[in-house]
Image (cartoon, grey):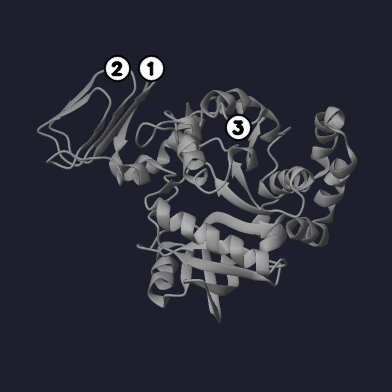
Amino acid sequence: MLCVLIMAGGKGTRFWPLSTEEKPKQFLKLIGEETMIQMTVNRISNIVSIDKIFISTCTNYVDLVKEQLPDIPNENIIVEPEGRNTAPCIALSSFIINKKFKNSNIVVLPSDHLIKDNYEFLDIVNCADAFIQNNKEAIVTLGMTPTRPETGYGYIKYGRENKKFEKHNIIKVDSFVEKPNLEKAREYLSQKNYLWNGGIFVWNSINILNQLQKYSPSTYNALKMINNINDEELIKYINENYKYTESISIDYAVLEKSDSIYVIPSNFGWDDVGSWEALERYKDKDSLGNVLVGNAKAVHSEENLVISSTQEIVIEGLNGIYVIECDGKILVGKKSNVSNVKELKKIL
């Protein structure tokens, strides 16, 4: 049995001011007519029924989840009392999923990533699920074939132990690598045995809890009584005990320590669309290379990024700038510096 955990608690600060702490990017229509989280749920619901899809989020976003995903059962919305990184989030969710669907496999998905080839993505998820069914103590991650020397992603270095399972390669992971500088990213691209870490994992629910008990015991022990708590007392128990978990990522807590991690090299048009630069890759451009979103116009101007949510914006005779307007805030700067909007938020 396959269940799905979609992680939807992020604040999306790199997309400010369009993405805010009140309504971060997973709840926005960045590409197409659906929000990012709706795209994620609709994509995976082709192979998993809605009662087996769980959303992990924080208190502030519960209403947004219910509004945008009305078919998700209320008991499948897992609420973190506070953000404590991905290991506690996964521990909490795995306890709850395993309690409802004992010994199930779980695919963990970010809520705000773009996938172009849904068929290939679902085929690989099904392959990973089948592999875990036959290898209960393994963990599978999906590694994205890099297309450029990207400094904004972590990487997965894989080794030579290559297993052919169904029609996909499943390769033993050597190590997880932090976001590199440009020189290192170019090196990884040329070496051909590095993949982007997209944060997509498949594992057995009991195995990941065993791994957390071994490598992150404080987190496991803080939440282990979930198995014995009735539904009426569950929220109170979580609120009282979540603060005792270790604030650490699942990569550091488990993946870098476990000796049974495998990766499936994947090429299904993945992007985390985590920045304005990334969004520009997928928006249509006019004949002069301008990206114009909303009520925006460019006259005698080239290679600009202009985003309007409420006000009309017209630029003239400008090249290589960004203009981002949202809720009365207007940011203007060199397009090459658009990644600095997160720092501008601190100044303002």
Left or right of 137? Residue 275 is left
- How far across and how far down the image is residue 340, in percent? 41, 40
Counting residues from the start of the chain, the first of labels 1 and 2 encountered is: 2
- How far across and how far down the image is residue 344, in percent? 44, 33
Q: Residues within 10 Å of mark 2 (few under 14, many from 20)?
A: some
Which label number is shown at residue 311? 2
Between marks 3 and 2 in the image, the one whose residue lies nearer the viewer: 3
Q: Amino acid at mark 3?
A: Ile
- CA–CA distance between discs 3 and 2? 35 Å
Callout 1: SS: loop
Between marks 3 and 1 in the image, the one whose residue lies nearer the viewer: 3
Q: Amino acid at mark 1?
A: Gly
Labels 3 and 1 touching (C-beta < 8 A): no
- How far across and how far down the image is residue 234, in percent? 83, 33
Which label number is shown at residue 211? none
- In the picture of the structure, the residue carrying the numbered disc 1 is 328
- CA–CA distance between discs 1 and 2? 8 Å
157 or 53, nearer to the observer: 53
In the picture shown, does residue 56 fall above or below 294?
Answer: below
- One can see residue 151 in this view: no
Labels 1 and 2 touching (C-beta < 8 A): yes
Counting residues from the start of the chain, the first of labels 3 and 1 encountered is: 3
- Looking at the rendered structure, the number of numbered marks drawn on it comes to 3
- In the picture of the structure, the residue carrying the numbered disc 3 is 72
Q: Residue furthest left?
A: 300
